[in-house]
Image (tube, rainbow, N blue to C red):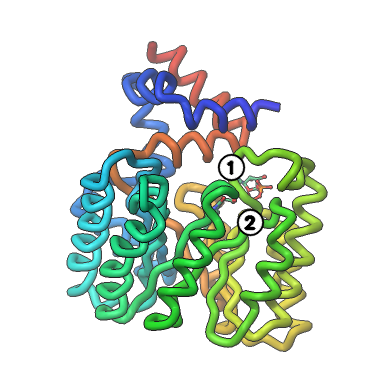
Amino acid sequence: MLGPVILAASRSDRMRRLISAAPVTKQVVDRFIPGETVDGILPIVRQLTDNGLELTMDVVGEDITTPEQAEAARDAYLELIDRLKPLELGERAEMSVKLSMFGQALPGGHELALANVRPVVEAAAEIGTTVTLDAEDHTTLDSMFAIHEELRKDFPQTGCVIQAYLFRTEEDARRLAAAGSRVRLVKGAYKEPAEVAYQQKHEIDKAYVRILRTLMEGEGYPMIGSHDPRLIAIAQELARTAGRKLDEYEFQMLYGIRGEEHLRLAAEGHRMRVYTAYGTDWYGYFMRRLAEKPANLRFFARSMITKG
Ligand SMILES: Cc1cc2nc3c(=O)[nH]c(=O)nc-3n(C[C@H](O)[C@H](O)[C@H](O)COP(=O)(O)OP(=O)(O)OC[C@H]3O[C@@H](n4cnc5c(N)ncnc54)[C@H](O)[C@@H]3O)c2cc1C
């Protein structure tokens, strides 16, 4: 019941001001967003890769309101890629981007987002890695898939995300399960209406399995974005049945969630990629993490009361 309320708050400017200014918030935020600057995040990159993990890196931010902010987002990723270069991690450190941060919702936003994201994809390719386009709310997806298709003409390794809770996704998965494509499957983190998305957890989980089967049986490279132990076991089984080797799919989880499971899967020989977010505009990302697990909200509320 709390999830939709928190997701609604994640889009409220008033709540953003209140929560961002609360003195205790930062300590709780650090669990999910372990740095504010490139300098702050590089030690985490080293720590994760030293532990046999891979990364997909997200400079937090979304729903910007001016073209200058979109350019600043592009430049933040270019700076990150520049700083990753000497580490020579190649595809062990890839980038995740939200097109809304690149101007997608502004007038002329589709072209603007494409123009801003292209140099990031080019720079990533130059250091031997790639970019995955995150999936945001359902109204943005036609544009996201069109940008994905456009980028793949020059950079076929560019990935995208599909969300199991949306009715449209089974068809999207069939289209995307083609040779050379990289697709991350997640349950979905936004507040979506019943006209376009399953609302019940068991329906979403069942859809996840159907879509994952399509990806595993297809010719692309599936990226399983979930912390759900049942789905992880099913994914392993589906990969085995489809005859996939350990390097023909990967698991992905968020930094700060089930860290011991990251290490367990990596120790079993799986490719395990940790979605690592950093930056100062963390509000939307943080609120979605609270909405996914009520215990996070209770912990957050308790620390506000104790410290406040
Ligand atoms: C790598 C990655 C990338 C993602 N990218 C996108 C994207 O582009 N677009 C999008 O809409 N969504 C994205 N998501 C979020 C996703 O849609 C889900 O909201 C999120 O993963 C929770 O679903 P779950 O599959 O982990 O299953 P759940 O059933 O929600 O969780 C399973 C278990 O994982 C643990 N867990 C899950 N979430 C939390 C949390 N926040 N805090 C503490 N424990 C938790 C709990 O132990 C829980 O019981 C991404 C998720 C991952 C892992």
- For the N terminus, the quadrant is top right
Q: Residue 219 sits in which quadrant?
A: bottom right
Compared to residue 282, the image places residue 76 above or below, namely below
Q: Say which amino acid is labelled 1.
A: Tyr
User: Does label 1 point to a residue whose CB lies under 8 Å from ligand 1?
Assistant: yes
Compared to residue 13, the image places residue 128 above or below, namely below
- Horizontal and vertical percent position of residue 66: 27, 41
- Horizontal and vertical percent position of residue 189: 59, 45
Q: Residue 238 sits in which quadrant?
A: bottom right
User: Does label 2 point to a residue whose CB lies under 8 Å from ligand 1?
Assistant: yes
Q: Say which amino acid is labelled 2.
A: Gln
**Contact? badges 1 and 2 (CB < 8 Å):** yes
Q: Which residue is mark 1?
A: 190
Instruction: Choose between 104 and 231: the one closer to the eye.
Output: 104
User: How far is disc 1 from disc 2 in space, using C-alphas?
Assistant: 10 Å
Q: Which residue is mark 2?
A: 163
| Disc 2, SS | strand
- Horizontal and vertical percent position of residue 160: 51, 66
Residue visible at 66% across and 67% down in the picture: 172
Q: Residue furthest front?
A: 108
Q: With 28 as the anchor, is 205 left or right in this view?
A: right
Q: Residue 241 sits in which quadrant?
A: bottom right
Residue visible at 50% across and 53% down in the picture: 254
- Horizontal and vertical percent position of residue 221: 58, 79
- For the C terminus, the quadrant is top left
Instruction: Choose between 180 and 63: the one closer to the eye.
Output: 63
Instruction: Choose between 211 and 53: the one closer to the eye.
Output: 211
Residue visible at 64% across and 31% down in the picture: 4
Crowd rating for badge 2 (residues with CA inside 10 Å; few <14, some 14–19, many 20+): many
